[in-house]
Amino acid sequence: MPLSQLLLLGAIAGLTVYLGLPVALLRHLSLRSRGALNGVATGILVFLTIEILGKVLESGERALESWSTGAGSLLSLLTLLGLLAGGLTLGLVSIPLLERRLLRRWTRPAPPLGIVAQAAHLPSRARSAVELQPHALALMIAAGIGLHNFSEGLAIGQSAAAGAVPLALLLIIGFALQNITEGFGIAAPLAGERPSLQFLLLAGLIAGGPTFLGTLVGASWSSEPASIAFLSLSGGALLYVIAEFFRLGHAMLAKVPFMLSVAGGFLLSYLTELVLVLTLGG
Protein backbone atom coordinates (compact mmCIF):
# COMPACT_ATOMS: atom_id res chain seq x y z
CA MET A 1 0.00 0.00 0.00
CA PRO A 2 1.43 3.43 -0.93
CA LEU A 3 2.41 5.52 2.09
CA SER A 4 0.17 8.41 1.00
CA GLN A 5 -2.88 6.14 0.90
CA LEU A 6 -2.01 4.61 4.26
CA LEU A 7 -1.66 8.06 5.85
CA LEU A 8 -4.98 9.18 4.38
CA LEU A 9 -6.75 6.16 5.82
CA GLY A 10 -5.01 6.69 9.16
CA ALA A 11 -6.24 10.28 9.23
CA ILE A 12 -9.79 9.17 8.44
CA ALA A 13 -9.64 6.58 11.24
CA GLY A 14 -8.76 9.30 13.74
CA LEU A 15 -10.97 12.10 12.52
CA THR A 16 -14.19 10.07 12.71
CA VAL A 17 -14.13 11.38 16.29
CA TYR A 18 -15.85 14.44 14.81
CA LEU A 19 -18.96 12.35 14.11
CA GLY A 20 -19.57 12.10 17.86
CA LEU A 21 -19.01 15.77 18.64
CA PRO A 22 -22.42 17.18 17.52
CA VAL A 23 -23.80 16.02 20.88
CA ALA A 24 -22.11 19.13 22.27
CA LEU A 25 -24.49 21.30 20.24
CA LEU A 26 -27.59 20.07 22.09
CA ARG A 27 -29.30 22.94 23.89
CA HIS A 28 -31.90 23.46 26.59
CA LEU A 29 -30.95 20.30 28.46
CA SER A 30 -32.07 19.87 32.04
CA LEU A 31 -29.52 19.18 34.74
CA ARG A 32 -30.72 15.56 34.95
CA SER A 33 -30.31 15.11 31.20
CA ARG A 34 -26.79 16.48 31.35
CA GLY A 35 -26.02 14.17 34.24
CA ALA A 36 -27.28 11.18 32.25
CA LEU A 37 -25.15 12.18 29.23
CA ASN A 38 -22.13 12.50 31.47
CA GLY A 39 -22.88 9.07 32.90
CA VAL A 40 -22.97 7.49 29.45
CA ALA A 41 -19.71 9.23 28.56
CA THR A 42 -18.18 7.96 31.81
CA GLY A 43 -19.12 4.40 30.91
CA ILE A 44 -17.50 4.78 27.49
CA LEU A 45 -14.29 6.06 29.07
CA VAL A 46 -14.29 3.29 31.69
CA PHE A 47 -14.47 0.67 28.93
CA LEU A 48 -11.73 2.38 26.95
CA THR A 49 -9.49 2.59 30.03
CA ILE A 50 -9.99 -1.10 30.85
CA GLU A 51 -9.12 -1.98 27.26
CA ILE A 52 -5.98 0.19 27.31
CA LEU A 53 -4.68 -0.98 30.68
CA GLY A 54 -5.50 -4.59 29.79
CA LYS A 55 -3.14 -4.36 26.81
CA VAL A 56 -0.43 -2.74 28.92
CA LEU A 57 -0.64 -5.29 31.74
CA GLU A 58 -0.69 -8.14 29.23
CA SER A 59 2.58 -6.86 27.75
CA GLY A 60 4.11 -6.78 31.23
CA GLU A 61 3.02 -10.36 31.88
CA ARG A 62 4.51 -11.50 28.57
CA ALA A 63 7.81 -9.81 29.41
CA LEU A 64 7.86 -11.48 32.84
CA GLU A 65 7.13 -14.88 31.33
CA SER A 66 9.83 -14.34 28.70
CA TRP A 67 12.39 -13.50 31.39
CA SER A 68 11.39 -16.43 33.61
CA THR A 69 11.92 -18.88 30.73
CA GLY A 70 15.25 -17.35 29.77
CA ALA A 71 14.01 -15.99 26.44
CA GLY A 72 14.22 -12.36 27.57
CA SER A 73 16.65 -10.32 29.60
CA LEU A 74 16.11 -8.81 33.03
CA LEU A 75 16.97 -5.40 31.61
CA SER A 76 14.17 -5.65 29.03
CA LEU A 77 11.71 -6.65 31.74
CA LEU A 78 12.70 -3.81 34.06
CA THR A 79 12.63 -1.30 31.19
CA LEU A 80 9.12 -2.30 30.19
CA LEU A 81 7.85 -2.28 33.79
CA GLY A 82 9.47 1.12 34.31
CA LEU A 83 7.74 2.50 31.22
CA LEU A 84 4.44 1.03 32.41
CA ALA A 85 4.68 2.50 35.92
CA GLY A 86 6.20 5.78 34.79
CA GLY A 87 3.69 6.29 31.97
CA LEU A 88 0.72 5.54 34.22
CA THR A 89 1.98 7.90 36.92
CA LEU A 90 2.83 10.66 34.47
CA GLY A 91 -0.58 10.32 32.85
CA LEU A 92 -2.29 10.67 36.24
CA VAL A 93 -0.37 13.80 37.26
CA SER A 94 0.02 15.49 33.88
CA ILE A 95 -3.67 16.25 33.42
CA PRO A 96 -3.98 18.14 36.74
CA LEU A 97 -0.83 20.07 35.84
CA LEU A 98 -2.30 20.83 32.42
CA GLU A 99 -5.48 21.96 34.14
CA ARG A 100 -3.58 24.27 36.47
CA ARG A 101 -1.13 25.85 34.05
CA LEU A 102 -2.67 25.81 30.59
CA LEU A 103 -6.41 25.89 31.12
CA ARG A 104 -6.78 28.76 33.59
CA ARG A 105 -8.94 30.79 31.27
CA TRP A 106 -11.47 27.94 31.15
CA THR A 107 -11.64 27.48 34.91
CA ARG A 108 -14.45 29.33 36.57
CA PRO A 109 -13.83 30.98 39.96
CA ALA A 110 -15.60 28.83 42.51
CA PRO A 111 -18.13 30.79 44.56
CA PRO A 112 -18.84 29.54 48.08
CA LEU A 113 -21.76 27.46 46.92
CA GLY A 114 -20.90 26.87 43.28
CA ILE A 115 -19.95 24.15 40.89
CA VAL A 116 -19.19 24.24 37.22
CA ALA A 117 -22.13 24.65 34.87
CA GLN A 118 -25.46 25.78 36.30
CA ALA A 119 -24.11 26.23 39.81
CA ALA A 120 -27.17 28.10 41.00
CA HIS A 121 -29.44 25.21 40.03
CA LEU A 122 -27.51 22.32 41.53
CA PRO A 123 -28.95 20.38 44.46
CA SER A 124 -27.57 21.18 47.89
CA ARG A 125 -25.34 18.08 48.00
CA ALA A 126 -23.31 19.56 45.13
CA ARG A 127 -23.08 23.15 46.26
CA SER A 128 -19.74 22.70 47.97
CA ALA A 129 -18.00 21.02 45.01
CA VAL A 130 -15.50 22.86 42.84
CA GLU A 131 -15.20 21.57 39.28
CA LEU A 132 -13.56 22.43 36.02
CA GLN A 133 -15.55 24.27 33.44
CA PRO A 134 -16.82 21.79 30.80
CA HIS A 135 -14.48 23.18 28.12
CA ALA A 136 -11.45 22.27 30.22
CA LEU A 137 -12.82 18.82 31.02
CA ALA A 138 -13.50 18.18 27.32
CA LEU A 139 -9.91 19.10 26.46
CA MET A 140 -8.61 16.79 29.17
CA ILE A 141 -10.63 13.93 27.72
CA ALA A 142 -9.44 14.77 24.21
CA ALA A 143 -5.82 14.72 25.38
CA GLY A 144 -6.19 11.29 26.98
CA ILE A 145 -7.93 9.88 23.91
CA GLY A 146 -5.29 11.47 21.68
CA LEU A 147 -2.53 9.55 23.47
CA HIS A 148 -4.51 6.35 22.97
CA ASN A 149 -5.10 7.14 19.31
CA PHE A 150 -1.38 7.69 18.75
CA SER A 151 -0.77 4.11 19.87
CA GLU A 152 -3.57 2.96 17.56
CA GLY A 153 -1.86 4.77 14.69
CA LEU A 154 1.38 2.99 15.58
CA ALA A 155 -0.43 -0.34 15.26
CA ILE A 156 -1.82 0.63 11.84
CA GLY A 157 1.54 1.81 10.52
CA GLN A 158 3.48 -1.15 11.91
CA SER A 159 1.02 -3.64 10.42
CA ALA A 160 1.33 -2.05 6.98
CA ALA A 161 5.13 -1.87 7.25
CA ALA A 162 5.24 -5.59 8.07
CA GLY A 163 3.26 -6.35 4.91
CA ALA A 164 0.05 -7.20 6.76
CA VAL A 165 -2.07 -4.80 4.70
CA PRO A 166 -5.39 -6.63 5.33
CA LEU A 167 -4.77 -6.38 9.08
CA ALA A 168 -3.94 -2.68 8.74
CA LEU A 169 -7.22 -2.10 6.88
CA LEU A 170 -9.19 -3.96 9.55
CA LEU A 171 -7.53 -1.86 12.24
CA ILE A 172 -8.41 1.33 10.35
CA ILE A 173 -12.07 0.35 10.08
CA GLY A 174 -12.27 -0.75 13.71
CA PHE A 175 -10.55 2.33 15.10
CA ALA A 176 -12.68 4.61 12.91
CA LEU A 177 -15.90 3.18 14.36
CA GLN A 178 -14.52 3.23 17.90
CA ASN A 179 -13.55 6.88 17.60
CA ILE A 180 -17.16 7.86 16.95
CA THR A 181 -18.12 6.76 20.47
CA GLU A 182 -14.99 8.44 21.85
CA GLY A 183 -16.14 11.69 20.23
CA PHE A 184 -19.34 11.40 22.22
CA GLY A 185 -17.25 11.08 25.38
CA ILE A 186 -15.55 14.39 24.58
CA ALA A 187 -18.79 16.16 23.72
CA ALA A 188 -20.96 15.05 26.64
CA PRO A 189 -19.61 17.61 29.18
CA LEU A 190 -20.27 20.37 26.63
CA ALA A 191 -23.96 19.62 26.09
CA GLY A 192 -25.93 22.79 26.75
CA GLU A 193 -22.75 24.90 26.91
CA ARG A 194 -22.89 26.16 23.29
CA PRO A 195 -19.21 25.58 22.45
CA SER A 196 -17.85 27.40 19.41
CA LEU A 197 -17.14 25.58 16.17
CA GLN A 198 -13.46 26.47 16.57
CA PHE A 199 -13.35 24.79 19.97
CA LEU A 200 -14.96 21.60 18.66
CA LEU A 201 -12.50 21.54 15.77
CA LEU A 202 -9.62 21.90 18.24
CA ALA A 203 -10.91 19.16 20.55
CA GLY A 204 -11.42 16.79 17.62
CA LEU A 205 -7.95 17.50 16.29
CA ILE A 206 -6.35 16.86 19.70
CA ALA A 207 -8.18 13.53 20.00
CA GLY A 208 -8.10 12.30 16.41
CA GLY A 209 -5.00 13.90 14.89
CA PRO A 210 -2.53 11.64 16.75
CA THR A 211 -3.86 8.64 14.81
CA PHE A 212 -2.38 10.16 11.66
CA LEU A 213 0.91 10.91 13.44
CA GLY A 214 1.06 7.40 14.89
CA THR A 215 0.45 5.89 11.46
CA LEU A 216 3.28 7.97 10.00
CA VAL A 217 5.70 6.95 12.76
CA GLY A 218 4.61 3.30 12.80
CA ALA A 219 5.08 2.93 9.05
CA SER A 220 8.81 3.60 9.41
CA TRP A 221 9.60 2.61 13.00
CA SER A 222 8.40 -0.21 15.23
CA SER A 223 8.81 -0.16 19.01
CA GLU A 224 6.82 -2.08 21.61
CA PRO A 225 8.28 0.01 24.47
CA ALA A 226 7.05 3.21 22.78
CA SER A 227 3.59 1.72 22.36
CA ILE A 228 3.55 0.67 26.03
CA ALA A 229 4.63 4.15 27.11
CA PHE A 230 1.86 5.91 25.16
CA LEU A 231 -0.80 3.43 26.25
CA SER A 232 0.25 3.85 29.90
CA LEU A 233 0.14 7.64 29.58
CA SER A 234 -3.31 7.41 28.04
CA GLY A 235 -4.58 5.04 30.73
CA GLY A 236 -3.33 7.28 33.54
CA ALA A 237 -4.82 10.41 31.98
CA LEU A 238 -8.20 8.74 31.47
CA LEU A 239 -8.25 7.46 35.06
CA TYR A 240 -8.01 11.06 36.27
CA VAL A 241 -10.69 12.21 33.84
CA ILE A 242 -13.03 9.41 34.94
CA ALA A 243 -12.65 10.53 38.56
CA GLU A 244 -13.65 14.06 37.51
CA PHE A 245 -16.65 12.68 35.63
CA PHE A 246 -17.84 10.75 38.67
CA ARG A 247 -17.63 13.84 40.89
CA LEU A 248 -19.49 15.98 38.39
CA GLY A 249 -22.05 13.28 37.57
CA HIS A 250 -22.97 12.67 41.21
CA ALA A 251 -23.53 16.40 41.60
CA MET A 252 -25.90 16.52 38.64
CA LEU A 253 -27.82 13.29 39.13
CA ALA A 254 -28.75 10.92 41.95
CA LYS A 255 -26.33 8.03 42.37
CA VAL A 256 -28.54 5.22 41.09
CA PRO A 257 -29.62 6.93 37.82
CA PHE A 258 -26.05 8.09 37.25
CA MET A 259 -24.61 4.60 37.72
CA LEU A 260 -27.28 3.20 35.40
CA SER A 261 -26.13 5.73 32.79
CA VAL A 262 -22.52 4.63 33.36
CA ALA A 263 -23.55 1.02 32.83
CA GLY A 264 -25.35 2.02 29.63
CA GLY A 265 -22.26 3.74 28.24
CA PHE A 266 -20.06 0.79 29.16
CA LEU A 267 -22.42 -1.69 27.50
CA LEU A 268 -22.68 0.52 24.41
CA SER A 269 -18.90 0.41 24.01
CA TYR A 270 -18.77 -3.31 24.68
CA LEU A 271 -21.49 -4.06 22.13
CA THR A 272 -19.64 -1.90 19.59
CA GLU A 273 -16.52 -3.97 20.27
CA LEU A 274 -18.45 -7.24 19.82
CA VAL A 275 -19.93 -6.05 16.53
CA LEU A 276 -16.44 -5.18 15.28
CA VAL A 277 -15.10 -8.59 16.30
CA LEU A 278 -17.97 -10.35 14.51
CA THR A 279 -17.88 -8.28 11.33
CA LEU A 280 -14.09 -7.95 11.01
CA GLY A 281 -13.21 -11.43 12.12
CA GLY A 282 -11.47 -10.45 15.39
Image (tube, rainbow, N blue to C red):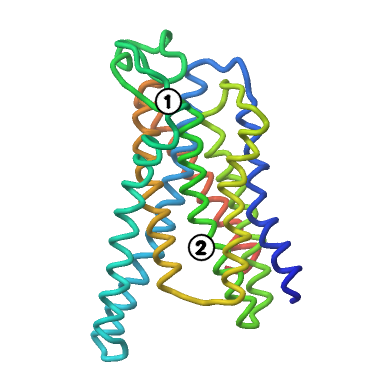
Image quarter hosting the N terminus: bottom right
Label 2, secondary structure: give it: helix
Q: Which residue is mark 2?
A: 151
Task: Give the position of the C terminus as an image quadrant.
Answer: bottom right
Which residue: 38% across, 40% down? 242
Where disc 1 sits, the SS reads loop
Instruction: Report the residue at 41% width, 46% height from top.
Output: 46
Left-right relation of 108 to 276: left
- Residue under label 1, please give it: 107
Where residue 254 sits, quadrant-wise, is top left
Cα–Cα gap, marks 1 and 2: 30 Å
Residue type of the residue flagged with mark 2: Ser
Vertical arrangement, residue 268 with respect to residue 71, above or below: above
Looking at numbered disc 1 in the image, what kind of residue is underneath it? Thr
The answer to which quarter of the image holds residue 84 is bottom left
Residue 47 is tagged as: none
Q: Residues within 10 Å of mark 1 (few under 14, many from 20)?
A: some
Residue at 33%, 53% in the rendered image: 90
